[in-house]
Every structure is written in structure tokens, then in C-alpha cells.
């Protein structure tokens, strides 16, 4: 009787905002280091192209998760994927967007969605990821942010003000 020699699962990296820019760069780098990747973003075609690229180039598994993390149902799908990932070692919270213009003149819904994406989604995904990471004593969480948060001036509706005194 032959023994079943199953390979241990490769470590998994889940990257939000993976369809372009920093998120795509993280996905490529992690795949090059042998991580299977789950790519999360709204733009399916770009995710499919990236998944094909990293699978072919690095021989890793690349899963596409089309999701708008400002939508509760989509965020829940990604949370569930994070929760069930027994081999999750890397979570990259990278999805984001910005708005310009005076806060009081901007559409409040866009401001709300921006805060959901920049604050609520990373908090929820990190919360669910840490349970498994801590239990396995292994894992990394990267929260990508922008220096734009510190640039004050007209047309920048949401900024972080420095403390004085």
C-alpha cells in the first residue's frame, strides 16, 4: 500500500486593491516568493490578467475575488475567505481611493465609502485574519496608506491635523 504524501499547502497572501499599483506589485512580489495569492479588487479583467501572469510565471495558485469592499455583502465574502484560510500568512490591506474638493461640497456618500474602505474594511479583515495568525504564531499584516492624509490645504476634504502645544 502506497503512503499518501501530500504536499503541505503553500502559504497564502490575500491582497486587496490588487488590480493595479502597489497592490499588484505586492501580489507579484509575494507570488515570486512562493505564496499562493488571493487577489481582491473591483476590476475583474485586471485581476484575471494578474492571476494568469503570476500563475504562469511563478507556478503559484492565484484566486480572483471580485469585490467592492465598500459594499457590505462583498466585504463579508472577503471576510469569509480570510476566515477559512488555514494557510494565510500575509494580508495586505491596500484598497483605497481619495476625493478632492471641499468636504461640505462633496457628496457625503463618497466620503462615507472612502472611510469604509480605508478604515472599516482593513479593521474587519485584520480582525478575522489575526485569529488564525496568532493561533499559528505566524503571519503578517500590511496596511498601505498614503501620505496624502497628511497634506493639508484647499480641496483636501479629509486630512489629519497635527497636534500643537
Image (cartoon, rainbow, N blue to C red):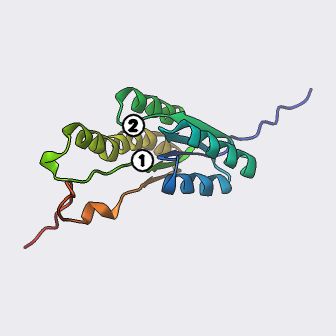
- The quadrant where residue 25 appears: bottom right
| Residue sitting at x 20%, y 60% | 160
Q: Residue 95: which numbered mark, if any?
A: 1
Left or right side of 160 for 30 = right
Q: Please state the horizontal and vertical placement of residue 78, each as a whole percent of the image.
A: 46, 34
| Residue sitting at x 36%, y 31% | 71
- The quadrant where residue 63 appears: top right
Q: Quadrant of the C terminus?
A: bottom left
Left or right side of 153 for 54 = right
Q: Secondary structure at mark 2?
A: loop
Q: Please state the horizontal and vertical placement of residue 12, each as a whole percent of the image.
A: 59, 44
| Residue sitting at x 40%, y 33% | 75
Q: Please state the horizontal and vertical placement of residue 117, each as a whole percent of the image.
A: 34, 43
Confirm whether residue 33 shows in the render.
no
Residue closest to the eye, 44 or 124: 44
Q: Which residue in the rendered view is the most extreme toward the left?
A: 165
Mark nearer the N terminus (2 vs 1): 2
Whether label 2 touches label 1, CB < 8 Å: yes
| Residue sitting at x 35%, y 49% | 97
Q: Dot 2 surroundings within 10 Å: few (below 14), some, or many (20 or more)?
A: many
Residues at marks 2 and 1, CA–CA distance in whole angstroms: 8 Å
Q: Secondary structure at mark 1?
A: loop
Confirm whether residue 1 shows in the render.
yes
Q: Quadrant of the N terminus?
A: top right
Task: Give the residue at mark 2.
Answer: 69
Residue closest to the eye, 88 or 66: 66
Amino acid at each position: 500500500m502506497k503512503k499518501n504524501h501530500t504536499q503541505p499547502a503553500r502559504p497564502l497572501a490575500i491582497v486587496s486593491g490588487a488590480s493595479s499599483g502597489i497592490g499588484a506589485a505586492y501580489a507579484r512580489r509575494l507570488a515570486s516568493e512562493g505564496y499562493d495569492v488571493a487577489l481582491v479588487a473591483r476590476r475583474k479583467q485586471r485581476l484575471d490578467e494578474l492571476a494568469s501572469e503570476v500563475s504562469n510565471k511563478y507556478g503559484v495558485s492565484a484566486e480572483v475575488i471580485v469585490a467592492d469592499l465598500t459594499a457590505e455583502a462583498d466585504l463579508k465574502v472577503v471576510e469569509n475567505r480570510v476566515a477559512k484560510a488555514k494557510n494565510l500568512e500575509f494580508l495586505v490591506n491596500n484598497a483605497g481611493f481619495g476625493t478632492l474638493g471641499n468636504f461640505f461640497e462633496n457628496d457625503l456618500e463618497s466620503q462615507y465609502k472612502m472611510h469604509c474602505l480605508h478604515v472599516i474594511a482593513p479593521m474587519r479583515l485584520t480582525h478575522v485574519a489575526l485569529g488564525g495568525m496568532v493561533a499559528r504564531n505566524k503571519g503578517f499584516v500590511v496596511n498601505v496608506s498614503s501620505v496624502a492624509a497628511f497634506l493639508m490645504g484647499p480641496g483636501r476634504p479629509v486630512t489629519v491635523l497635527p497636534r500643537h502645544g
